[in-house]
Image (cartoon, grey):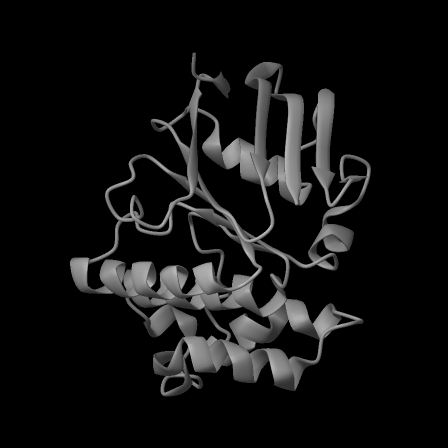
Amino acid sequence: MLELRDVHVEIASAQVLRGLSLQVAQGQMVGLVGRNGAGKTSTLRSIMGHLTPRRGQILFEGQDLVRLPAHVRAGLGIGYMPEDRGLVPELTVEENIVLPLWVSATLSLDERLAWVYSVLPELKTMSDRRALLLSGGQQKLVALARALAVGTRLLLLDEPFEGVAPALSMRLSEVIGQLKSTDLSVLIAQSDTNHANNLLDAQVVIERGANAA
């Protein structure tokens, strides 16, 4: 489903990825584990097209994504949940969830929204609440829901459990665990595996932008 081959990325002349390689098979849940600053976020941003590799390949179902713009990648069925949530504060919960669906030429907004609410029914009860009024944990749920709305093939989750109260962390883990019974592939970037160790099929450890020895 997803394969990174010898990916090198620079930000302002600083090398953040140094030949990273990894694979995520269809229906597999893989953890990208490393300390803060190891290059986890840079890896996900490179997959999504926010960063351009200087060298290497990023293959999605055999297609090299490196030269494809970010909006085209989302249209391939890739959903991205950034660490900072990336919600639009003045928009409602539902508007934040369907935001990427508004520009999708292939997905049915009503069908995808109904499916998201079936997975996260608690969000339907707060659908008309503005995002700025939510707690940090609730915002994480909305960010996950937005990724699920367009992520029909692959989900990229950046530190989904970071800074979340224990109860909501357990809820996030429960929702992500439900995805294991589907064909959806999931790559979870995190500093440790305490919350997702029982969910992962495999782990890739990253150190200073490269695969750990």
Q: Quadrant of the N terminus?
A: top right
Q: Position of residue 184 (x, y in %)?
A: 56, 58
- Taking the spot 51% from the left edge, 65% from the top edge, the residue there is 88
Q: Position of residue 70 (x, y in %)?
A: 72, 48
Residue located 56% across and 80% down the image:
113
Residue 92 visible at all? no
Q: Residue at x 32, y 34 (%)?
A: 191
**Residue 38 locus on image (x, y percent):** 42, 24
Residues 201 and 100: in front is 201
Where residue 190 sits, quadrant-wise, is top left
x and y, in percent, of residue 20 in the image:
57, 22
Q: Is residue 59 above or below residue 27?
A: above
Give 81 or 152, whichever is nearer the viewer: 152
Location of the C terminus by quadrant is top left
Which quadrant of the structure image shows residue 178? bottom left
Q: Is residue 162 visible?
A: yes
Q: How many marks on residues? A: 0
Say left or right for 71 vs 176. right
Relative to 197, residue 155 above or below: below
Q: Is residue 5 left or right of residue 176?
A: right
Q: Nearer the viewer, residue 10 or 31?
A: 31
Q: Horizontally, is 121 left or right of 115 in the view?
A: left
The residue at the point 68 percent across, 59 percent down is: 77
When asked about the image quadrant of residue 54, the answer is top right
| Vertical relation: 45 (above or below) 136 | above
Compared across the picture, whether 98 is left or right of 106 comes to: left
Residue furthest left in the image: 166
